[in-house]
Image (cartoon, helix red, strand yellow):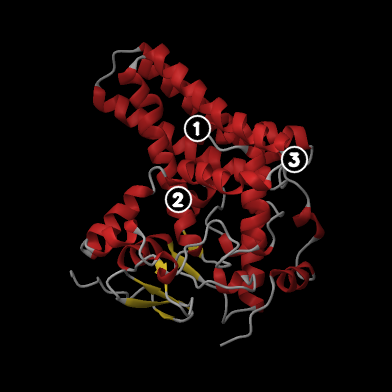
Amino acid sequence: MNELQHLGVYARELKKHLPKEVFDPVPGRLWWLVPHVSIVVGCVLLITLTALPLLVKLLLSVMIGGAFACLGFLGHEVLHGSVVRRAWLRDFIGAVCFWPFGVSTKLWRRWHNVEHHGQTQHPDLDPDAFDTLEAYDGHVGVRFLAKLPPRVRSLLYFVSFTFWFSLHAILVRRAVRHQLSKQDRLTTRWQTLAPYAFWVAFGVLVGPANFVLIYLLPVLIGNFLVIAYIATNHGLNPLTETNDPLENSLSVVNPRWLDALHLNFSHHVEHHVLPSVNPVHAPKIKAALKRLYPDRYKELPWFVALKALWFTPRFYGRDRMSLVGPEGRTYGTLGHGLDARKVQPRDEA
């Protein structure tokens, strides 16, 4: 096994192999607001003001959900400072992009930029990392899951994608609220409540049927798309106390058109090595990483990674390098015995 290296080691090496302009913000990415906001506004108007068939309105609702996800991807890079550097503009655009999900920009910058990126996959410090099965010993939820067939557990896990991004933001705020100053607690509270108050008021205005098509179904779709990436980013990798992105992160491979639409969100190892670099440059970083660390760089087709998530449990073993189900079935992680392309279905218990 290769000795783990801190992300700073890779960042320093990569800077020798990348042009200086790669590290500049890319304000042109803001143009992505135009099509996605236009899709949302246009579809909302068509749903509320026309008598289109329900099937057509459902298609428009799906389009809104896709636009919500794409706005989330844009907000992610904006709040990393890789699009604009002015704090007020960064936070305003980030708030617009995260408005459908009710995610506070101040909380996000602490939770995601500082804690997740600073302590990725650390078993105790990363708010996004799964824990060991032993840590949940006796937990009522784990006892419930242990009684379910593995495929049912997998189905429930994938269903949770439809709300997990929004819910996790609320759970993280509750977990860290005592670490925040009084002013920051107030700020994160109103930044969380304001979007939901807006959507509730909008629902009263347009009526329940339109509300389902304009917001409820789209936000479920948006959550699913965002979490379908986030779950593959780290869920098949081991826990690590050394923040080594080549060990604890995974990039997924998509068609070029999908990468363009989703703003290279698939390039996750690249993002963790150089989080302040705009994802438009991710392919250059990827090429350099594969040239410098060909035996350590991890990537999988997105569908293959999702399939592996379906067929593997979501708790870690005591070694933190294996995945263990409540019924005791054990799998390796990427780089530690798991071949995601060949993983087999779990036996129904």
Image x and y of residue 77, in percent: 64, 46
334 sits to left or right of 188: left
What's the residue at 67%, 65% (across, down)? Answer: 273
Q: Which residue is mark 3?
A: 84
On the picture, is 202 further left or further right than 307?
right
How many C-alpha atoms fall within 10 Å of the one at disc 3: few (<14), some, or many (≥20)?
many
Mark 1 Cα-neighbour bin, 10 Å: few <14, some 14–19, many ≥20? many
Tags 2 and 1 in contact by the CB under 8 Å rule? no
Q: Residue at x 34, y 77 (%)?
A: 330
Sequence-wise, the earlier of marks 2 and 3 is: 3
**Left of 167 or right of it: where is 306?**
left
Pointer 2 or 1: first along the chain: 1
Give the numbered dot on residue 285: none
| Residue 80 point in image, percent of width and height | 69, 48
Residue bearing mark 2: 227
Identify the residue under disc 1: 100
